[in-house]
Amino acid sequence: MRNSLLGIAASLVLIGGAWGAQAAAGLDRSVLDEINFARSHPFQYAVRLRQSLAGEHAGARYASVTDADPDAVDDALAFLARQPPLAPLSQDDRLAASAQDHIRAQGPTGEIGHDEAGGVSFGARLKRHGVWAGLSAENISYGYDKAPDVVRQLIIDSGIASRAHRKNIFDPTLSLAGVSCGAHSAYGAMCVIDFAGALAPSH
């Protein structure tokens, strides 16, 4: 099993408003769609990334990215320029349930990281939902409630020397994903993306 490092995949952008189930489900789908666009069209995604960072409000919104790791954006663009297109990830309900468990555990407490309180690991969460994967990974974004922002944060991967979140998104051995997003008491919002390779069909 392979876990990504959480590192500093967080931006202190406090977001007001209540999270309804319908809104959260819509964000879940949009995050997976955005990831799949990046995987399938890395060159076009790089163009979109440049445009978003050059936008009118980019300086204030992404200051934490450039201040913490000034080379991260150029590194991401160079990666995308040489990245071949990959097949999109298929949505898996078991992985989504594992991700949702983490939202329920961390959202109210404001904790961060891949383990639940009491030391319940990412792997244990997967097994709770019948996922026994030889290849698995997890990305967590804190601080954004829009799909483009969530995925941009993980692909730029500021402050993570290994760029583990980016590598997870573009890992050709990972073919399935489940996403869950919701409120986070410290950062305003969080999104959990659980990945796996091929799995036996659920029963």
Image: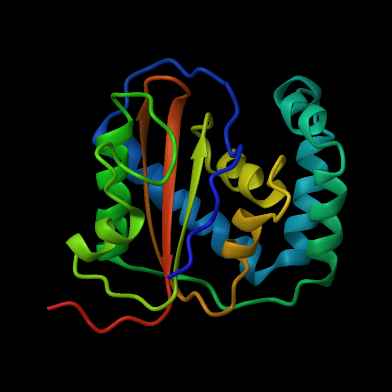
**Would residue 34 appear left or right of 15 to someone viewing this image?**
right
- Give the image location of residue 162, x and y in percent: 70, 56
Q: Which of the 4 image quadrants contains residue 44? A: bottom right
Residue drawn at 33 percent across, 51 percent down? 99
Q: Residue furthest left?
A: 203
**Would residue 42 appear left or right of 24 to someone viewing this image?**
right
Of the 4 image quadrants, the one containing the N terminus is bottom left
In the image shown, does 81 or 48 lie closer to the viewer? 81
- Give the image location of residue 173, x and y in percent: 53, 80
In the image shown, does 15 or 1 lie closer to the viewer? 1
Q: How is the image coloured?
A: rainbow
In the image shown, does 106 or 189 lie closer to the viewer? 106
Q: Which of the 4 image quadrants contains residue 164? A: bottom right
Q: Which of the 4 image quadrants contains residue 194? A: bottom left
**Would residue 177 appear left or right of 73 to someone viewing this image?**
left
Residue drawn at 53 percent across, 32 percent down? 144
Q: Residue furthest front?
A: 119
- Give the image location of residue 177, x and y in percent: 41, 65
Q: Is residue 129 above or below residue 7?
A: below
**Would residue 8 appear left or right of 139 to someone viewing this image?**
right
Residue drawn at 64 percent across, 63 percent down? 167
Residue drawn at 48 percent across, 19 percent down? 15
For the image, the number of numbered tags is 0
Q: Is residue 174 above or below residue 127?
A: below
Of the 4 image quadrants, the one containing the C terminus is bottom left
